[in-house]
Image (spheres, rainbow, N blue to C red):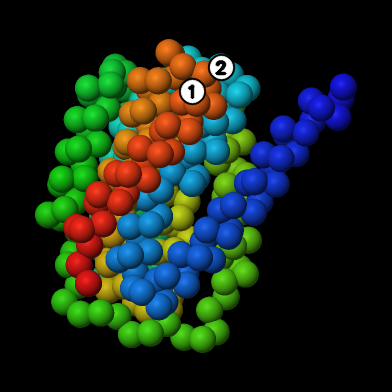
Amino acid sequence: MLGRLLLPVHCMLLLKLTLIPTLLYALSLVARYRGPALAGWLSGLPVVAGPILWLLAHEQGKAFAAVAAMQAIAAIAASEAFNLIYARTAARRHWPLALAAALGGWLLAALLLQQLTPSLLLALGVAALSVGGNYFCLPRPAQLPPDSPSHERLWLRMLAAAVLTLAVSAAAQRLGAAWSGVLAVFPLLGVVMAVSMQQAQGAAAVQMLLRGMLLGRFAFAAFCLTLVLLLPRLDRDISFLLASLLSLLAQSASRRGLRP
């Protein structure tokens, strides 16, 4: 009996320790061989938030997860604040200052979101405004960055991703539905990839990466919106399956927006 109860916990722990580092490794290869814009676009898939929201639904119930998913849509604004501040600061400063400034901007935006009265229309509006604003405000690099050096420390990025995943998911389970939704959209991949890309290829590569992430927001929003609408009405796992399928469809539709 105890073994059956602990099995989902062990499986989720294994998922956290392997899925995100593996994804980060794959995205690093995509960025190296196909460009940072494509890597940023692929990072929009809900591979971080999806397992966190599923675990919340499993442990806290469907209603809790639906509220967290709605807040996650609004929290796109906080992630876009991180992207904008990092992209502009990286053009003039080294990565420690760019990261500190961007995380400060994310935290301020996240705190402001907690002051809003939760509603689906408001969450969609805030997310759309932030993505639309960053379409015009994010820098547009004039040329492709040089190839990344061969001595990339991918193992260090993967370790950092695993540690951040555990920390964010652990905090999300303890802070209530509103903060759980915000933390599910914590720019985990953005932190690790932006820093490593700035070190390896410079600010132009970071800017291309973060502009690519704009298109990935549509897939993430489709995933969370589907959960908000279906979790109160359908089985938990069916809701997540349908949300994943719609997310993939939205991701495929947004592909045409990428520039070669």
Q: Give the residue pinned by disc 1.
A: 65
> Do the numbered discs 2 and 1 sit on residues whose CB atoms are within 8 Å?
yes
How far across and down, in percent of the image, does residue 24 sit? 51, 61
Q: Give the residue pinned by disc 2.
A: 61
How far across and down, in percent of the image, does residue 162 sit? 61, 53
Q: How crowded is mark 1: few (under 14 residues within 10 Å), some or many (20 or more)?
A: many
Q: In this view, does 215 lie above or below 181?
A: below
Q: Is residue 124 above or below residue 20?
A: above
Of the pair 21 and 166, the residue shown nearer to us:
21
Q: Residues within 10 Å of mark 2 (few under 14, many from 20)?
A: some
- Looking at the rendered structure, which numbered label has been put on residue 181? none
Identify the residue at image location x=22%, y=22%: 121
Q: Quadrant of the N terminus?
A: top right
Q: Can the viewer see residue 227 in this picture?
A: yes
Of the pair 109 and 48, the residue shown nearer to us:
48
Q: Is residue 65 above or below residue 219?
A: above
Of the pair 115 and 183, the residue shown nearer to us:
183
| Most distant residue in the left direction | 136
